[in-house]
Structure formats: structure tokens, C-alpha cells
């Protein structure tokens, strides 16, 4: 008989030591009974991540990232609980019986349909006479058959119902194809049409190389060209968000780790051609500006990124936002590689001697700060007072973005930059340092405010949406102070000691918990317990698949609960507290009624009930 999922989760957890799991990603230093590492979840400058083998937990003392083996893998791999569980199971050599939730099923249906379409487009490109012009186009771009196959390229023919027909014939639901953005319903309301026509299809894959979406490039001689965009992406789905994806990362990540950097270019074909020419550490953003999510992905694999631009475009990046994205990240170095003007990497690579020029450009990429400085000086050979001020602030504010305690190499770079600025602009170095100090202070003040906001969110345990409040009931105000503390302590305690859940369920009613998040967790625990299962954090997590945020909270609560001694006594105190609170609530309600009760009889009746409720009424 297959194990139930919770049992499997426990088994995987038991087989996955936190030190080994975290150690596979980060370098750990022993520190007494625990281990320390640079925290990958914030700009860490001294090791603030604590890995505790006794409790099988990690915690960052700076950004409060915390959790167990599952959450760690979830955050590192940017995957859900299910995938993290699968990854850890595979590592531990545990084979899983497929257990799926509705969300997993929806996700895997989307994955299946994207994979199906990828295959169809690919077959079409490789075999169909209709794809002749596409094959010619790729040939003209000098992409080899191997590269085309490696990247899974395909072709969507010109007729408007090619994919729709295939899907119907093979029983693939058109609604799913619509969901991933490959077909759309006809305006007349009957049937569907293909959204991609006469386009070379570039499958976009996640780092596990599963296709999650497509980019389509229209053929240069296409009759549709005048009224269709050159590039086009499939829909944003739970699988695919174009602002998250770096095209080619599945191919590049290993090579990047070896090369020590990842190069960023602009186009799909640039990525493929670089790969074909033996420079595989190259990726492209999906036609969007670089953002923090890209940066976090890059930081996971390398400590250096090289932004590749042709000489014309390189001018623009003196003011490029993308560059600034990288600066606040600890230990990531940004450099700019400049290619000859007018050539994109693909053109350059196929030209004679191009591979050498390209690899030399990567190898001699200029540090981004130096690059900006050179540009600014070139643009302002004799700067006015105002221009001087602007140049100084532009450069220094970038430096100020970087955490103070970055590597010594970075400190050296800062010193050199300050010296250069002062020398070139005829300023005293002290003046430049002073200005840098001011800008850093401003930056730190901003970061401090942000941290305070984060901390406020953290301590409130408040991932609740108001929508979760039971409908039709007046919204209860979260109880203040003591009550909120008790609710939290109860859940902390029970998560640490699931054997006490039965006793708690007898005396603390779920409706007494006013915090909707805590109530949901407790409700799941009661339900598990009454079904005769162990209501521990792993079981609760299974029940909270729809609320990964709450699953995180549960872990944190259990973590705190583990420090509670004499748990039965604790429970007794909490239960008494709840009883007292309930009494207070009842009395308050009666007092309010009394205050508004019009006639004497009703008032007397209420008074009697209040006295009966246990305490002399103080009216
Ligand atoms: Zn941290």
C-alpha cells in the first residue's frame, strides 16, 4: 500500500539533513553546535544565516528568513512545496507515489499541453513542407540543426487553424491551449483559431528544462508582417511569467558556474548562436528590462554578470536601470562588454573572427562603475559646475546602493573611483567622500524604514486577506494584546506538541480564535486530530497547500513552540486564559445591552444573568 503523503513528507524530511541540504548551495562554517553561512535571501555581508542541525532549521538573524529543508529548497529553487519535496525525495533516493492536489493537477495539465505543443511545432519545423521557409530562415541565421534541436525550436504554419485541428484530432482540450495562450476563441463565438502563425517558435524552459511557454518570431517574408508584431509571447500562466524568465538559463547555468560569470544578451538567437559557438554562459531577458527577480536568479549561480551591448547601445547604459538593479546585491559584480557598433552577438559570432572578438569582449568587460565614469567624462569633457555636481551624484549614488561591508575588492574599487572623480573634476577627495557619506546615510535610512515595515509585517503574523472572514458575520476586530498572544501561544504549543491537540479541542472552540490565519491552522489541526492523524507541522502543511504563506507561519510558530517547557502546564494556563476572556466578552456584551436596555425588567434580567455568569457586575 502506498504511504500517505504526510508519512512520505516525514520520511523525506528524516532523510534530508538540513546541513547537507543547505551545504549543497552555500558554503558553511561551523560555529559551535550550529553552522553559519552568508544568507542568500538578503544582501548579507557577514554570515547571518544560522543552520541548526539539532532542530533541523535555518534562520537568518538579519532578514528573519527561516524554515526547514523544504522551505529552504523552495526559496532557493523558487519552486512550490511539491517540487521541493520531489527534489529532496530524489536526492534522498526515495521514490514517490504520485499524490496530487488540484493545483498540482492544473499545473501539470498546463505543463503537458505546453510540452505537447512544443513537440508538434518541432515536428512541423523539422519535417513539414510548410516549414520550408522557416528552415531557410534559420539556415540563413546560421543556426545548426543540432542547436535547433537542443533548444527545441519549432514552427507554427501560416494557416490559422493548424494547431486547433491537431488538438481536436488528438483530443487535446482547446481550453487548455487557450489558457497557455496558443489559441483564442473566434470573435463569432464558434471555435478557436491559432494565435501563432507563420512564426518560428522558441520554447521557453524553466531551469529543469521543461517548456513553460513560447516566444514566436514572425518570418521575414511573412504576408502577416505588416500587421503583426515581430516577436510575440504565449500567455502569462502559473508556469510562465516573462518578467521572471532568463532565456537559455537551463543551458547556461552550469557553464556560467564554470566560467565564473553569466553574460546577458538581448535576443534568443544571440543565446543560441553563442551556445553553438562554444560560449554557453549566455542568457537573454525576455524583452523586458532587467529586474530584481532576474538578479536574484543570476545571484544563485554566479557572482559576476556581464551585460553585452553593441557600441551604439552601450552609450545608453550609462543611465541603464538594469545596471543599478545589481548594485544592492552583495557579492555580485557587474561588467559591461562592448561589441563593435551595429552588430548583435549573433551577427558578430557568424562573421569571420567573430567568436574571438566576442570572447575577448566578454573577457575584457569593463567594470560597470568605470564604464559609467568613462561615459560621463566623455559626454562632458569640460563640465560646468552643475554638470560636475550631477556626475558626482550619479556615480556616488550608485556606490551608495551597495551594502557597506562588501568585499575588500569592492572597497578598493570605491577608493579608486573616488580618487578618479576628485582628480578629474578638480575636487578635493574629502569633499567627494563626504558626499558619499551623505548619500549612504540617505540610502541606509531608506533601508531601515523598509526593514521596519518588513518587521512589522513579520511580527503581526498577518498574511490574512479580509476575504477569509466568514461572510455574513460582522468582522471581528483582532483582539488586542493578551488575547492575540494567547491565540498565538496556543498554536505554537500545539504545533510543538501535537499530542495535546485532543485536549485543547475539548476546551478551546475554534470560534474563539479571532485571527483568521491562526484559526485556519488550528482548524486543520483539530480536523487531523479528530481523523485520528498526528496533527504535526508536516501534516498541517499538507492541508495548507492552498496557503503556502500560512504553512510558513506554521513552521515559524512550531519553532517558537519548541522552546516551551512543561507544555501541559502551558496549555492549562492558556485554556484558563481563554475561559476568562470568554467571560469578559460575555460580560461586556451584557453591559452594552444593559446600557441600551430601555425598561427595568429587561435590565434586571440582564443583571441577574451577569451575576450568574460568575462575577459581580460592576455597573
Ligand atoms: Zn537573511
Image (tube, grey):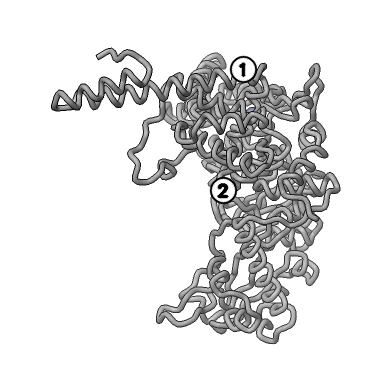
189 to the left or right of 607:
right
Q: Camera-side residue: 422 or 507?
A: 507
Q: Which residue is under mark 2?
A: 546
The CA span between labels 1 and 2 is 34 Å
User: Farthest left residue?
Assistant: 599
- Tell me the mark number nearer the camera, choosing from 1 and 2: 1
Above or below, comparing residue 144 to residue 549 in the picture: below
Residue 187 point in image, percent of width and height: 41, 78
Residue 424 vertical placement versus 220 (above, below): above
Q: Which quadrant of the figure has residue 369?
A: top right
Judged from the image, the secondary structure of the residue bearing numbered disc 1 is: helix
Q: Which residue is mark 1?
A: 569
The foreground one among 184 and 502 is 502
Seen at 24% across and 14% down, the residue is 619
Screen quadrant of the N terminus: bottom right
Is residue 135 shown left or right of residue 91?
A: left
Tell me which residue sits at (41%, 29%) in the image: 478
Q: Residue at x 59, y 68 (%)?
A: 216
Dot 2: element:
loop
At x 53%, y 46%, the residue is: 316
Crowding at mark 2 (Cα within 10 Å: few <14, some 14-19, many 20+): few
- Whether residue 42 is visible, yes or no, is no
In the picture, measured across the screen, residue 577 lies left or right of residue 101, that is left
Q: Position of residue 69 (x, y in %)?
A: 73, 37
Asked which quadrant contains residue 300, the reply is top right
> First in sequence: mark 1 or mark 2?
2
Residue 273 at x, y = what percent? 73, 62
Residue sticking out furthest to the bottom: 129
Amino acid at each position: 500500500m502506498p504511504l500517505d503523503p504526510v508519512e512520505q513528507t516525514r520520511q523525506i524530511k528524516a532523510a534530508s539533513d538540513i546541513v547537507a541540504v543547505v551545504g549543497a548551495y552555500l558554503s558553511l562554517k561551523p560555529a559551535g553546535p550550529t553552522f553559519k553561512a552568508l544568507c542568500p535571501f538578503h544582501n548579507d555581508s557577514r554570515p547571518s544565516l544560522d543552520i541548526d542541525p539539532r532542530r533541523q532549521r535555518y534562520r537568518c538573524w538579519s532578514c528573519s528568513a527561516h524554515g526547514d529543508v523544504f522551505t529552504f529548497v523552495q526559496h532557493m529553487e523558487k519552486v512550490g512545496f511539491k517540487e521541493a519535496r520531489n527534489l529532496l525525495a530524489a536526492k534522498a533516493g526515495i521514490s514517490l507515489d504520485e499524490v496530487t492536489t488540484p493545483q498540482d493537477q492544473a499545473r501539470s495539465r498546463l505543463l503537458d499541453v505546453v510540452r505537447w505543443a512544443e513537440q508538434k511545432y518541432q515536428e512541423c519545423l523539422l519535417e513539414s513542407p510548410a516549414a520550408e521557409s522557416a528552415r531557410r530562415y534559420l539556415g540563413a541565421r546560421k543556426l545548426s540543426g543540432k542547436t535547433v534541436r537542443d533548444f527545441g525550436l519549432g514552427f507554427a504554419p501560416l494557416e490559422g487553424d493548424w494547431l486547433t485541428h491537431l488538438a481536436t484530432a488528438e483530443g487535446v482540450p482547446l481550453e487548455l491551449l487557450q489558457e497557455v495562450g496558443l489559441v483564442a476563441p473566434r470573435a463569432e463565438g464558434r471555435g478557436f483559431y491559432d494565435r501563432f502563425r507563420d512564426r518560428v517558435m522558441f520554447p521557453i524552459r524553466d531551469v529543469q528544462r521543461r517548456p513553460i511557454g513560447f516566444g514566436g518570431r514572425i518570418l521575414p517574408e511573412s504576408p502577416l508582417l505588416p500587421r503583426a508584431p515581430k516577436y510575440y509571447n504565449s500567455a502569462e500562466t502559473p508556469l510562465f511569467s516573462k518578467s521572471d524568465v532568463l532565456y537559455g538559463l537551463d543551458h547556461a547555468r552550469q557553464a556560467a558556474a564554470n566560467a565564473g560569470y553569466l553574460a546577458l544578451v538581448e535576443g534568443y538567437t544571440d543565446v543560441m548562436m553563442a551556445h553553438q559557438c562554444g560560449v554557453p554562459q549566455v542568457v537573454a531577458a525576455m524583452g523586458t528590462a532587467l529586474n530584481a527577480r532576474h538578479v536574484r536568479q543570476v545571484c544563485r549561480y554566479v557572482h559576476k554578470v556581464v551585460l553585452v551591448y553593441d557600441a551604439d547601445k552601450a552609450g545608453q547604459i550609462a543611465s541603464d536601470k538594469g545596471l543599478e538593479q545589481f548594485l544592492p546585491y552583495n557579492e555580485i559584480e557587474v561588467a559591461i562588454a562592448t561589441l563593435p557598433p551595429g552588430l548583435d552577438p549573433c551577427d558578430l559570432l557568424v562573421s569571420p573572427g567573430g567568436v574571438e572578438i566576442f570572447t575577448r569582449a566578454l573577457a575584457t568587460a569593463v567594470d560597470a562603475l568605470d564604464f559609467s565614469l568613462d561615459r560621463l567624462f566623455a559626454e562632458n569633457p569640460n563640465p560646468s559646475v552643475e554638470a560636475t555636481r550631477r556626475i558626482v551624484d550619479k556615480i556616488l549614488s550608485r556606490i551608495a546602493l551597495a551594502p557597506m561591508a562588501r568585499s575588500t575588492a569592492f572597497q578598493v574599487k570605491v577608493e579608486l573611483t573616488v580618487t578618479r572623480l576628485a582628480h578629474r573634476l578638480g575636487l578635493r577627495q574629502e569633499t567627494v567622500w563626504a558626499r558619499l557619506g551623505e548619500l549612504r546615510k540617505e540610502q541606509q535610512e531608506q533601508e531601515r524604514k523598509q526593514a521596519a515595515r518588513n518587521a512589522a509585517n513579520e511580527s503581526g503574523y498577518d498574511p490574512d486577506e479580509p476575504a477569509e472572514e466568514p461572510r455574513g458575520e460582522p468582522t471581528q476586530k483582532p483582539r488586542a494584546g493578551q488575547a492575540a498572544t494567547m491565540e498565538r501561544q496556543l498554536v505554537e504549543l500545539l504545533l510543538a506538541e501535537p499530542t495535546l491537540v485532543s485536549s485543547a479541542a475539548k476546551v478551546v472552540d475554534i470560534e474563539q480564535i479571532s485571527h483568521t490565519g491562526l484559526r485556519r491552522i488550528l482548524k486543520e489541526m483539530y480536523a487531523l486530530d479528530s481523523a485520528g492523524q498526528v496533527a504535526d507541522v508536516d501534516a498541517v502543511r499538507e492541508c495548507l497547500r492552498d496557503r503556502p504563506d500560512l504553512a510558513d507561519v506554521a513552521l515559524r510558530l512550531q519553532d517558537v513552540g519548541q522552546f516551551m517547557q512543561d507544555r501541559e502546564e502551558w496549555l492549562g494556563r492558556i485554556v484558563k486564559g481563554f475561559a476568562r476572556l470568554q467571560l469578559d466578552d460575555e460580560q461586556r456584551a451584557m453591559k452594552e445591552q444593559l446600557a441600551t436596555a430601555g425598561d427595568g425588567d429587561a435590565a434586571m434580567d440582564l443583571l441577574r444573568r451577569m451575576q450568574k455568569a460568575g462575577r459581580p457586575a460592576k455597573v
